[in-house]
Image: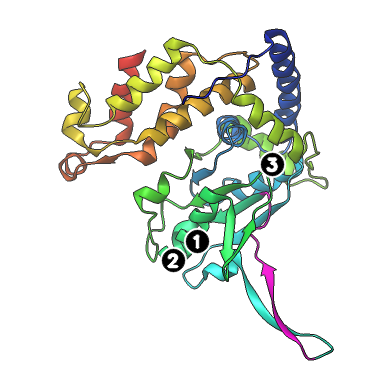
């Protein structure tokens, strides 16, 4: 039996969306006082958090990825923590472990000591430096929002988001994330260098006697409410069709595009369509719009699809890039 959606009061929904849009404008302003020259990165990270997902940030060192997480934790009123991933990091170092304790009467019992994952915003720094076993422990918690230790289930706090980083330059001694685990991230966001004006402003703002500090503009409870509101925003048939055409067109088995058939070994699964559906709603709300458009689908196509598809060996040998294939997909729905 299919579920019947509860009727919504359009006027009340519009009022909620407008109120949240004003609050999000204050959030972006607060982040912008501290993070310079990364407006698109900030927009995409906020889009992911509003959609209730996790982010994979790819960029060279020194571009402010750690500072972005600290800033978001303060601005959104979330408990933020950071874990530096290394080859010797064990699952218990992230999830926590049980210790045997003895009370004053000599009675022994196990007590669970929570690991750093029990927070609301976790920065997994250089996630691909940890072993596959440790990566899997984190990614399972990301999917299930709970930790199982010693047969006991420990739920993670809500909201719970992971912002993982990867360094695209130093690949020696790393364990690349398997494709099935990459799929757990809603967006893969490339962090590039700021432009000259932004780098100048950053240089002046961060090397003086006083440095700008982030201020809180939202709470965790308000973020959870916003994530619920995102799922109630209506999506038009044109946008729905564009999402389906884009995702299904990226699969070599079902596509009509030569670029996909010739260059892709495999394409995105249904989770990519779900990610696009939620992310387009969140992006529209961040822009102060009441409903997403096809332009939102096109804007988010690359960060949603890039880590959910792979080139064939022949395509890589010919110097083909995934961005070229994604550009052909975007043109097919434009």
Which residue is depicted at the point 56% across and 22% down?
A: 281
Q: For residue 137, which numbered disc appears in the image?
A: 1
Q: Nearer the viewer, residue 283 or 276?
A: 276
Q: CA distance from mark 1 to mark 3?
A: 24 Å
**Residue 175 in view of the camera:** yes
The residue that disc 3 covers is 72
The quarter in which the C terminus is drawn is: top left
Q: CA distance from mark 1 to mark 2?
A: 6 Å
Q: Secondary structure at mark 3?
A: helix
Scheme by which the image is coloured: rainbow
Q: CA distance from mark 2 to mark 3?
A: 29 Å
Mark 2 closeness class: few <14, some 14–19, many ≥20 residues within 10 Å: few
Q: Secondary structure at mark 1?
A: helix
Q: Position of residue 93 (x, y in %)?
A: 59, 69
Q: Earlier in the sequence, mark 1 or mark 3?
A: 3
Q: Nearer the viewer, residue 68 or 219?
A: 219
Q: For residue 133, which numbered disc appears in the image?
A: 2
Q: Earlier in the sequence, mark 2 or mark 3?
A: 3
Mark 1 near mark 2, Cβ–Cβ under 8 Å?
Answer: yes
Mark 3 closeness class: few <14, some 14–19, many ≥20 residues within 10 Å: many
Check the image and report above or below for 8 versus 74.
above
Q: Is residue 144 left or right of residue 307?
A: right
Question: Is residue 35 rendered magenta in the image?
Answer: no
Query: Where is residue 75, by image quadrant?
Result: top right
Check the image and report above or below for 294 versus 320.
above
Q: Is residue 114 left or right of residue 54?
A: right
Q: Position of residue 121 (x, y in %)?
A: 65, 48
Q: Position of residue 247 (x, y in %)?
A: 34, 27
């Amino acid at each position: 039996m299919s579920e019947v959606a509860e009727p919504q009061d359009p006027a009340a929904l519009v009022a909620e969306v407008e109120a949240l849009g004003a609050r999000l404008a204050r959030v972006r302003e607060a982040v912008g006082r501290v993070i310079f020259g990364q407006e698109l990165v900030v927009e995409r990270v906020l889009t992911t958090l509003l959609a209730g997902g996790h982010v994979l940030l790819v960029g060279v060192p020194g571009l402010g990825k750690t500072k972005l997480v600290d800033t978001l934790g303060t601005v959104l009123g979330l408990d933020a923590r950071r874990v530096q991933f290394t080859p010797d990091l064990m699952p218990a170092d992230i999830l926590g472990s049980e210790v045997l304790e003895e009370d004053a009467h000599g009675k022994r019992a196990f007590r669970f000591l929570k690991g750093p994952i029990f927070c609301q915003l976790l920065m997994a720094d250089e996630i691909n430096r940890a072993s596959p076993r440790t990566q899997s422990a984190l990614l399972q918690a990301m999917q299930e929002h709970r930790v199982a230790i010693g047969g006991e289930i420990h739920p993670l706090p809500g909201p719970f988001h992971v912002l993982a980083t990867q360094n695209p330059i130093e690949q020696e001694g790393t364990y690349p994330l398997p494709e099935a685990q990459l799929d757990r991230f809603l967006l893969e966001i490339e962090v590039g260098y700021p432009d000259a004006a932004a780098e100048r402003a950053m240089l002046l703002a961060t090397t003086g006697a006083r440095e700008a500090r982030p201020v809180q503009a939202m709470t965790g409870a308000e973020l959870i409410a916003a994530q619920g509101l995102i799922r109630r925003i209506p999506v038009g048939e044109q946008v729905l069709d564009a999402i389906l055409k884009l995702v299904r067109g990226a699969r070599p088995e079902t596509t009509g595009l030569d670029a996909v058939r010739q260059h892709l070994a495999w394409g995105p699964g249904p989770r990519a369509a779900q990610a696009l559906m939620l992310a387009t709603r969140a992006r529209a709300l961040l822009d102060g719009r009441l409903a997403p458009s096809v332009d939102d689908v096109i804007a988010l196509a690359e960060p949603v699809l890039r880590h959910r598809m792979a080139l064939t060996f022949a395509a890589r040998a010919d110097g083909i890039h995934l961005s070229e294939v994604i550009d052909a997909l975007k043109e097919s729905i434009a």
